[in-house]
Amino acid sequence: MHLTPEATLEESGEWLGLVLAPDQAKSCLSRLRHAPEIEMDYLFCLTGVDWKTHFSLVYHLSSTQHRQTMVVKVKLDREQPEMDTVSDIWRTAEFHEREAYDLFGIRFRSHPDLRRLFLTEDWIGWPLRKDYEDPVNMIKL
Amino acid sequence: MRTRKVRSNGCEDMDPYMENANQTGQPASFPGQVHQTPGGGILISSLQDVVNWARSNSLWPLVFGTSCCAIEMMSTASAKYDWSRFGFEVARATPRQADVIIIAGTIVNKMAPVLKRLYDQMADPKYVIAMGACATSGGPFFYNTYSVVKGADHVIPVDVYVAGCPPRPEALLHALIALQEKIKSGSTREQIRIGESKH
């Protein structure tokens, strides 16, 4: 597929995996959605992962027409994790990206309503990061 | 010695409590003393025992399941392990009509004031069962989590703890029967606070 020269495929997992750079990710995902032979119209999961040196976003896509599933991974910078929103491609990403923002602090550019989803609005910090400290609640072994 | 009551029209009927009466005329499974008064009535002494017996055999649980233990609670309520044999027939959705709250699931920091409010809305006498590891002590979320209360007894006083993650329905039934025995012996927190105890 003529996706992008920097994309790499990994076929070791259960589904086909695609690793993208963050600046081309949005256009590539849009093409995955709209290309008639791929037509990934169902984003069933969007999660963030903290690898201690960098973040990554994982998109699980599925095509209801062709009955295929694939995974797209985007590597993000640890100091300033930013990514374009995909909520204009898949509407469900609005809430998934709010969750990633709430727990990791990953900002999504041009997201219609980027605010915390599960935690209270006045919470300080990003709890699912590996360097999150909470001496009151978290007991370290 | 059977006791018969004779009605005015001459026919006899058997008092249902006295059908299995022992030699002294006391019914077999009824707590307290039964006195036959002339005229056919029954006067009961040891009122507190009777009240405790009645309360323990008709505890109505509050529908309160927050996570996976709720599935085991539902299966205890369903046909295979049926808890309505023991009197937990009606699971009320409103705390105003419930006697026992079975905390089936994890209590997070956001849920703790809700739990306290529900407990306050329940009418006396009320009892609490902490089901599962999360409600007992925070369970698998005791370390390294920012959001889970380490045990429901940080929020409300608990009578019976059930171990398990999740506990089997038989374990929950055992806890319910243990609560019934605690009520009959007068040793729940409520009863100790009020001061009625057999000891």
Image (cartoon, helix red, strand yellow):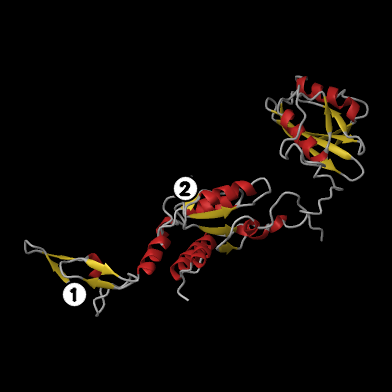
Q: Is residue B175 left or right of residue A37?
A: left
Q: Which residue is mark 1?
A: B2
Residue A15 is marked as none
Relative to the observer, which residue lies in front, B43 or A73? B43
- Read off the chain for label 1: B
Q: CA distance from mark 1 to mark 2?
A: 44 Å
At x 90%, y 30%, the residue is A21
Give the mark nearer the N terminus: 1 vs 2.
1
Instruction: Name the kind of residue labelled 2 in the image.
Output: Arg
Quarter location, residue A24: top right
Examine the rendering and report whether any part of residue B29 can be seen. yes
Give the image location of residue B185, x and y in percent. Answer: 45, 71
Relative to the observer, which residue lies in front, B143 or A57? B143
Instruction: Name the kind of residue labelled 1 in the image.
Output: Arg
Relative to the observer, which residue lies in front, A124 or B88? A124
How many residues crowd mark 1 within 10 Å: few (<14), some (14–19), many (20+)?
some
Q: Which residue is mark 2?
A: B96
For this orientation, the residue located farthest to the bottom is B23
